């Protein structure tokens, strides 16, 4: 996308972040002499009325809440070429994700963060809206206003927010692995304030432990490796992460109050942990394949054949963060072009890229020198050549559902074998493009909204291509579950030929066996160490 010069009266200075749907720019209000963030919908989406409406819906939700606890929208408009934009708060001190690059937070800071985010959620829930994507990169840090003692925290990215009334029936299964409540996946249904309680609980878990919560049923208690954290605090957090909505705290305020009370309970028993006690979660939270019931088309170019369906106001909530942890040149405002979303189902998110800052979090480079706290280490070998800028998308795709053979390491290995992680790959002879070598008329079925949207045109962005792989495998993978042999190799065959061919050959067709073997070699390198 070319850089516009102005958006209305706002001068545009530089790009902050870009995703598959929109780009966020650092702007300057020349009348008020103040920096702003400007979110502009991508030109290829601007002509699609459904996407435009979702884009404006995010701005309207933020404006309706109109709270200093959330990113605020100041203006809205269209560029001369018809692309819509809106103007928002510019957060100059980064995000909680940047702060976590240093490791877990002291308990006092955790409590202040929980209080601030809970207050923001309380304001949001008062308007009957559920956020659905609470995570460190969506909590922004803003310089204190005159007279304030510490930095302010702002909730951002309402790109997948929903009115409570709109969640009574099935809606798209959206969220971020580790932070999404069970009821969000595979289809979001019956979502309410307790859905965000789970997200806030996952956020607090990360702040205490320094790691994203594991999948349901595999979570260590958050204080397992921090004996100074009271066990009562861990109890409060684990209740927030209950798989059953009825078992969780009824509101974000109730959770934050209980957390503070537990921390103040000096007579509480010593923290449990050390050995990594597991908490059984059980229930019906297993995630399953998602997608429409209409006939889908398997991958493979023009020869592809159709296959069956696949508040209360509390100022100065946050004590001053250590500035060296948050400096780094005004990090992108509402992570609004950023939020690492699971782009599934029929909803069209307004956000996009996988990293929360223009340069990505302080983690590994593409050649392998990971930060000690690399958040992807649970799912990928962070010392491998998997590019850091695609790791969020890869982790999302690998967790789209529970399917034998499907994992972030498998998605990474398949991308390596297909394109060498080249986002600009172009093979017109085979009609395959982008990092995942999608054929555009096939990708149409697996993009957000499916066949309701036109065939995407090359170049095919990683933000569109990689999540589509997860949707593809989760819809079609169960149809080859009974085929003998290596599940991962069979998934490679599925990706290249389709359900019927894999079934007919009883596994990977001969012409694709070397390709499958190559994927397996990369897979050995990419599994977490």
Image (tube, rainbow, N blue to C red):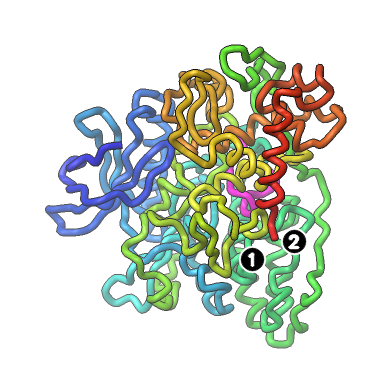
Q: Which quadrant: the C terminus?
A: bottom right
* CA distance separating discs 1 and 2: 10 Å
Image: magenta residue range: 172-183
Dot 1 surroundings within 10 Å: few (below 14), some, or many (20 or more)?
A: many
Circles 1 and 2: CB atoms closer than 8 Å = yes
The residue at which mark 2 appears reads as 219
Quarter of the image for residue 280 reads bottom right
Q: Which quadrant: the N terminus?
A: top left
182 to the left or right of 453: right
Q: Residue at x 25, y 36 (%)?
A: 77
Q: What percent of the width, then of the height, locates residue 292?
A: 64, 23
Circle 1: element type: helix
Is residue 469 rendered magenta in the image?
no
Quarter of the image for residue 226 reads bottom right
Dot 2 surroundings within 10 Å: few (below 14), some, or many (20 or more)?
A: some
Q: Residue at x 66, y 51 (%)?
A: 526
The residue at which mark 1 appears reads as 205
Q: Find the residue positioned furthest to the bottom.
A: 267
């Amino acid at each position: 996308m070319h850089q516009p010069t102005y958006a209305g009266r706002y001068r545009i200075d530089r790009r902050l972040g870009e995703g598959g749907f929109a780009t966020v720019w650092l702007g300057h209000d020349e009348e008020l002499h103040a920096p702003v963030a400007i979110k502009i919908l991508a030109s290829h989406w601007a002509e699609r009325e459904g996407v435009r409406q979702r884009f404006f819906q995010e701005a309207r939700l933020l404006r309706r809440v109109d709270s200093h606890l959330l990113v605020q929208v100041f203006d809205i408009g269209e560029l001369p070429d018809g692309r819509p934009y809106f103007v928002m708060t510019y957060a100059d001190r980064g995000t909680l994700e940047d702060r976590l690059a240093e490791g877990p937070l002291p308990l006092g800071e955790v409590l202040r963060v929980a209080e601030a985010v809970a207050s923001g959620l309380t304001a949001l829930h008062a308007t009957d809206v559920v956020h659905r994507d609470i995570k460190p990169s969506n909590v922004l840090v803003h310089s204190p206003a005159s007279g304030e003692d510490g930095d302010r925290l702002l909730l951002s990215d309402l790109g997948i927010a929903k009115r409570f009334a709109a969640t009574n029936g099935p809606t798209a299964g959206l969220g971020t692995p580790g932070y999404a409540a069970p009821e969000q996946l595979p289809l979001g249904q019956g979502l309410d304030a307790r859905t965000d309680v789970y997200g806030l609980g996952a956020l607090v878990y990360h702040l205490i432990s320094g790691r994203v919560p594991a999948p349901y049923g595999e979570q260590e208690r958050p204080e397992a490796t921090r004996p100074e954290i009271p066990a009562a605090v861990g109890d409060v957090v684990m209740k927030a992460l209950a798989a059953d909505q009825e078992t969780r705290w009824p509101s974000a305020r109730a959770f934050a109050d209980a957390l503070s009370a537990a921390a103040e309970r000096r007579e509480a028993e010593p923290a449990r942990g050390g050995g990594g006690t597991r908490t059984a979660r059980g229930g019906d939270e297993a995630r399953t394949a998602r997608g429409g019931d209409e006939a889908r088309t398997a991958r493979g170019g023009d020869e592809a054949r159709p296959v069956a369906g696949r508040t209360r106001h509390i100022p100065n909530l946050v004590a001053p963060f250590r500035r060296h942890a948050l400096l780094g040149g005004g990090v992108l405002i509402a992570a609004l072009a950023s939020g690492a979303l699971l782009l599934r189902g029929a909803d069209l998110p307004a956000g996009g890229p996988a990293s929360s800052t223009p340069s990505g979090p302080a983690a590994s480079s593409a050649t392998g020198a990971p930060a000690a706290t690399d958040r992807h280490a649970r799912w990928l070998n962070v010392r491998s050549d998997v590019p850091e800028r695609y790791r969020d998308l890869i982790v999302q795709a690998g967790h789209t559902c529970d399917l034998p053979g499907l994992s972030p390491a498998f998605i990474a290995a398949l991308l390596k074998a297909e394109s060498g992680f080249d986002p600009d790959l172009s093979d017109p002879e085979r009609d395959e493009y982008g990092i995942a070598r999608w054929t555009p008329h096939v990708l149409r079925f697996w993009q957000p909204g499916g066949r309701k949207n036109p065939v995407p045109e090359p170049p095919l962005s990683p933000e569109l291509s990689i999540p589509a792989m997860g949707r593809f495998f989760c819809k079609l993978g169960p149809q080859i579950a009974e085929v003998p042999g290596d599940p991962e190799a069979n998934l490679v065959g599925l990706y290249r030929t389709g359900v019927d061919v894999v079934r007919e050959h009883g596994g990977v067709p001969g012409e694709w066996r070397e390709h499958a073997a190559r994927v397996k070699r990369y897979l050995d390198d990419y599994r977490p160490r």
